[in-house]
């Protein structure tokens, strides 16, 4: 009888140790998952940039020799309301906003899509509060690296939307519906016109003619030439009051919380502008 009680006691002890070990393993695994998730959130934006630049490094020589296609001749016709040197910037937000976000981007670029889809709500919130205005510069990095004309065609269509006073909403629609990088679906004017139906009042005969005629093609190519001459690292290039913040500002990663913090710090003691809400896409 005594040995039976001893054996039972040993068995209970083993089960207790096993449960404690299992709990410790579960706690350790949860901590590892937290670290991995934090690292993923911190690096997701920078990883997108590396993807674009790495792709450029692999195919850049071939693309340079073969050309991007879709080169437009004739004078550069800037869209209505374009600003800055050579009228290459499309402004969004109240002109008197104390801070300016400068964005160089390509509608065909997946890293640009990650930036726009991740920060859209925050940027619009700051615009509506009169804290921030944005100046968009449209380029053709992916056309040049992978050939095709989707970057050019989409940028021209966006400039046509600017003529109609609906750039912001159409810009967002293009990124929300961005096709895979290798498909070059935006090379089709029919697709760009189809997406215009998501912006109330944009799909008009004037808009369609502007898209089909490539009215702003030379303007897009001029903007792209300035981007190349500026030796920017890749797309998107994002500057807050002239300082690079993508994928980080110094040692701090670009997050929605940090963007709000940086804008608030830059605007300290400055009066916000009166801003009207940007037209929304349907």
Image (cartoon, helix red, strand yellow):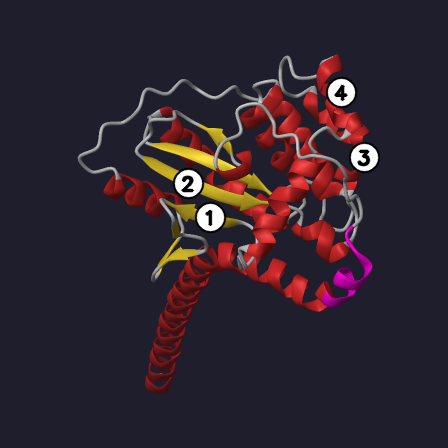
> Residue 66: within the magenta?
yes
Name the residue rendered at 53%, 29% in the picture. 82
Name the residue rendered at 31%, 41% in the picture. 263
- Is residue 27 placed above or below 183 in the rendered structure? below
Indicate the quadrant where residue 8 lies.
bottom left
Name the element at disc 3.
Answer: loop
Dot placed on the residue nearer the N-terminal end, 3 or 1: 3
Looking at the picture, how far across and down is residue 83, in whole percent? 49, 31
Looking at the picture, how far across and down is residue 91, in whole percent? 48, 30
Q: In this orientation, which residue lies closer to the viewer: 146 or 6?
A: 146
Dot placed on the residue nearer the N-terminal end, 1 or 4: 4
Q: Which residue is mark 3?
A: 188
Dot placed on the residue nearer the N-terminal end, 4 or 3: 3
Q: Which residue is mark 1?
A: 238
- Number of dots carrying numbers: 4
- Is residue 59 placed above or below 120 in the rendered structure? below
Tell me: 147 left or right of 97: right
Q: Which residues are magenta?
A: 61-68
Cβ atoms at labels 4 and 3 below 8 Å apart: no
Q: Main secondary structure of the magenta part?
A: helix
Residue 208 badge: 4
Dot placed on the residue nearer the N-terminal end, 4 or 2: 2
């Amino acid at each position: 009888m005594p040995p039976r009680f001893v054996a039972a006691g040993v068995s209970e002890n083993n089960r207790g140790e096993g449960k404690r070990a299992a709990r410790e393993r579960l706690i350790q695994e949860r901590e590892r998952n937290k670290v991995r998730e934090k690292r993923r959130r911190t690096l997701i934006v920078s990883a997108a940039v590396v993807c674009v630049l790495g792709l450029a490094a692999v195919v850049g020589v071939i693309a340079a020799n073969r050309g991007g296609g879709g080169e437009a001749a004739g004078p550069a016709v800037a869209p209505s309301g374009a600003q800055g040197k050579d009228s290459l910037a499309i402004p969004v937000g109240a002109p008197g906003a104390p801070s300016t976000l400068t964005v160089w981007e390509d509608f065909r670029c997946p890293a640009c899509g990650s930036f726009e889809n991740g920060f859209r709500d925050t940027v619009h919130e700051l615009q509506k509060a009169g804290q921030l205005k944005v100046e968009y510069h449209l380029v053709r990095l992916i056309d040049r690296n992978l050939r095709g004309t989707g970057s050019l065609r989409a940028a021209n269509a966006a400039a046509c939307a600017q003529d109609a006073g609906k750039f912001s909403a159409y810009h967002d629609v293009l990124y929300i519906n961005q096709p895979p990088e290798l498909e070059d679906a935006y090379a089709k004017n029919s697709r760009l016109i189809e997406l215009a139906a998501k912006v109330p009042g944009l799909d008009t005969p004037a808009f369609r003619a502007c898209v089909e005629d490539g009215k702003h093609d030379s303007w897009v190519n001029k903007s792209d030439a300035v981007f190349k001459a500026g030796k920017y690292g890749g797309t998107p290039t994002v500057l807050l009051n002239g300082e690079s913040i993508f994928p980080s500002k110094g040692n701090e990663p670009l997050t929605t919380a940090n963007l709000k913090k940086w804008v608030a710090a830059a605007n300290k003691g400055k009066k916000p502008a009166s801003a009207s809400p940007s037209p929304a896409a349907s």
